[in-house]
Image: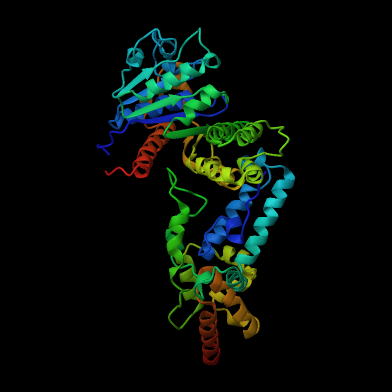
């Protein structure tokens, strides 16, 4: 049985200008497609083919979920047209996800085009944990998902959103955590982390 | 939508029998009739016709078999009125004619007669299996629906049906004898070419004769089945259609659509036991709601596809 061929985007079945959110959804859809005893693949693929298909998807996702590696990959393969494209997630909450085509087959790929036209969002200062949470919740992303994707522990993400600065580690770690958080929810990582750290510094000098 | 005058043929196949095809065809015809469409249901399951029973009718005297055997002059002579607005039936009930026994010329003639029917939508209820006589009805339709239920056996039959239909179409498009032989071999699961999917077939063709690739790819691009998932018991079941679409694209190169699902509903068989149609008996039951949604989305989707205004 044939496996999808081509670049990482083709393997995930998304357009090269797919938002981070679309890539995430495509990955989850495919992991479910290839899960054990999944009806759609059970009689179609051998266990070995399922294993290969999964490995292929994981490899593609591993590259594309990391904004920095994705930018490098895009540059190497001629996908890049504009810096910051890979980080965009701004409109994705209003779209239908790729794993639920509408009745009579709304074409997901054409809908996917419009998402990636603007850079990542920047929050007005001061950037508090509450502001981050509000932004995240507006996009329907759970903190658990942020943790799963960013690999930052749920506990630390909660400390960040609750502004429990004393519980957080040194600023260099906070910067990394907030950057990862920002990438997942669609904020500008560098500017958000700087603004959040500034806020941390302010609040600790107040105390 | 009212200016939709082009007659359309929809077909409902499934590979596996006993999954509710005829009931859905009947209910779909009923809902389309209620939407103001002029509909003729055609029971193309000549060996096991029972669409008349789904509509609460006795086995009709005149059937599609009479058209095939030229016992009547015109196909209109076997069209039966139902008691539902806009909905008529051509029965397939026939003790003397199994689907397997139609000759090629008879089939070509009956297909062209079906095409000539003066209605908005013809719905072909196909028999089970992947015989050419079933597949050819599927291939002439504007909307080819493939019904599956969320069970491995049904999904397996569904894939088999799709492959058989696509290979049949590709065979007709094969530009040379050598390519036709490869396409025919692909239909045999134990073929010596290692071909297990249409994508494998294309790979073999590109080795044998790269020039033949374009016409075959063009045919594949025009092959556009619509999945309908019946007897859905959970949200998980309803999502099966999405995964079927993805699996078709990734592993077979088939661009399918998920037309919709119909929930498992005891009302359906309770009505059938009284030889009544659930959509009529209990229009608010989940299955009737789903069929209505399916009808609307198929009509809407076709209007978009054909560029009809509304």
Q: On the rendered structure, is A39 left or right of B104?
A: right
Where is the N terminus of chain B found, in terms of image quarters?
A: top left
Where is the C terminus of chain B found, in terms of image quarters?
A: top left
Which residue sits furthest left? B3
Asked whether A169 or A7 is in front, the reply is A7
Asked whether B71 or A139 is in front, the reply is B71
**Vertical placement of A181 versus B65: above or below?**
below
Instruction: Mark yes or no: residue B266 visible.
Output: no
Question: Can you give x and y, in whole percent of width and height, for residue B85 in the image?
Answer: 28, 23
**Vertical placement of B226 versus A67: above or below?**
above
Query: In which quarter of the view is residue A171 placed?
Result: bottom right
Which residue sits furthest bottom? A205
Question: Can you give x and y, in whole percent of width and height, for residue A130 in the image?
Answer: 48, 75
Q: On the rendered structure, is B278 left or right of A146?
A: left
Identify the residue shown where x is 63% and y is 42%.
B205
Question: Can you give x and y, in whole percent of width and height, for residue A195 in the image?
Answer: 51, 84
Asked whether A90 or B112 is in front, the reply is B112
Question: Can you give x and y, in whole percent of width and height, for residue B89 in the image?
Answer: 37, 18
Query: In which quarter of the view is residue B9 placed?
Result: top left
Identify the residue shown where x is 42% and y is 22%.
B111
Instruction: Mark yes or no: residue B99 visible.
Output: yes
């Amino acid at each position: 049985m044939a496996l999808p061929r081509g670049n990482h985007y083709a393997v995930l079945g998304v357009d090269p200008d797919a938002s981070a959110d679309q890539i995430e959804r495509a990955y989850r859809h495919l992991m479910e497609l290839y899960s054990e005893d999944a009806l759609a693949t059970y009689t179609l693929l051998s266990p070995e083919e399922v294993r290969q298909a999964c490995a292929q998807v994981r490899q593609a996702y591993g590259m594309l979920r990391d904004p920095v590696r994705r930018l490098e990959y895009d540059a190497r393969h001629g996908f890049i047209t504009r810096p910051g494209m890979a980080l965009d997630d701004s409109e994705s909450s209003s779209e239908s996800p790729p794993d639920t085509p509408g009745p009579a087959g709304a074409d997901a790929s054409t809908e996917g085009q419009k998402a990636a036209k603007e850079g990542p969002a920047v929050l007005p200062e001061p950037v508090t944990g509450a502001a981050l949470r509000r932004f995240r919740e507006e996009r329907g992303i759970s903190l658990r998902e942020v943790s799963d994707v960013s690999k930052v522990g749920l506990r630390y993400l909660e400390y960040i959103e609750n502004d429990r600065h004393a519980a957080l580690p040194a600023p260099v770690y906070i910067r990394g955590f907030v950057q990862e958080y920002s990438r997942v929810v669609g904020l500008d990582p560098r500017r958000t982390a700087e603004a959040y750290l500034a806020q941390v510094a302010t609040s600790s000098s107040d105390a | 939508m009212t200016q939709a005058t082009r007659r359309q043929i929809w077909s409902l196949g499934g590979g596996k029998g006993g999954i509710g095809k005829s009931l859905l065809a009947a209910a779909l015809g009923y809902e389309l009739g209620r939407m103001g469409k002029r509909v003729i249901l055609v029971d193309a399951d000549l060996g096991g016709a029972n669409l008349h029973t789904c509509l609460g009718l006795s086995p009709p005297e005149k059937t599609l078999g009479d058209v095939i055997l030229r016992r009547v002059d015109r196909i209109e002579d076997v069209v039966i009125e139902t008691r539902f607005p806009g909905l008529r039936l051509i029965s397939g009930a026939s003790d003397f004619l199994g689907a397997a026994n139609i000759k090629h010329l008879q089939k070509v003639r009956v297909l062209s007669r079906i095409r000539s029917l003066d209605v908005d939508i013809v719905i072909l209820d196909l028999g089970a299996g992947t015989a050419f006589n079933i597949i050819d009805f599927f291939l002439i339709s504007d909307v080819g629906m493939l019904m599956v239920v969320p069970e491995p056996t049904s999904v397996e039959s569904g894939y088999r049906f799709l492959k058989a239909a696509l290979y049949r179409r590709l065979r007709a498009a094969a530009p040379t004898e050598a390519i036709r032989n490869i396409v025919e071999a692909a239909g045999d699961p134990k073929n010596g070419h290692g071909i297990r999917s249409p994508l494998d077939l294309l790979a073999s063709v590109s080795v044998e004769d790269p020039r033949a690739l374009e016409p075959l790819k063009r045919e594949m691009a025009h092959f556009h089945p619509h999945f309908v998932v019946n007897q859905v018991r959970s949200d998980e079941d309803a999502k099966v259609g999405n995964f079927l679409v993805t699996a078709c694209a990734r592993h077979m190169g088939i661009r399918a659509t998920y037309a919709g699902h119909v929930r498992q509903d005891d009302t359906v068989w309770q009505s059938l036991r009284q030889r009544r149609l659930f959509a009529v008996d209990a229009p608010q039951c989940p299955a009737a709601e789903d069929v209505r949604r399916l009808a609307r989305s198929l009509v809407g989707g076709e209007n978009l596809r054909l560029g009809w205004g509304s």
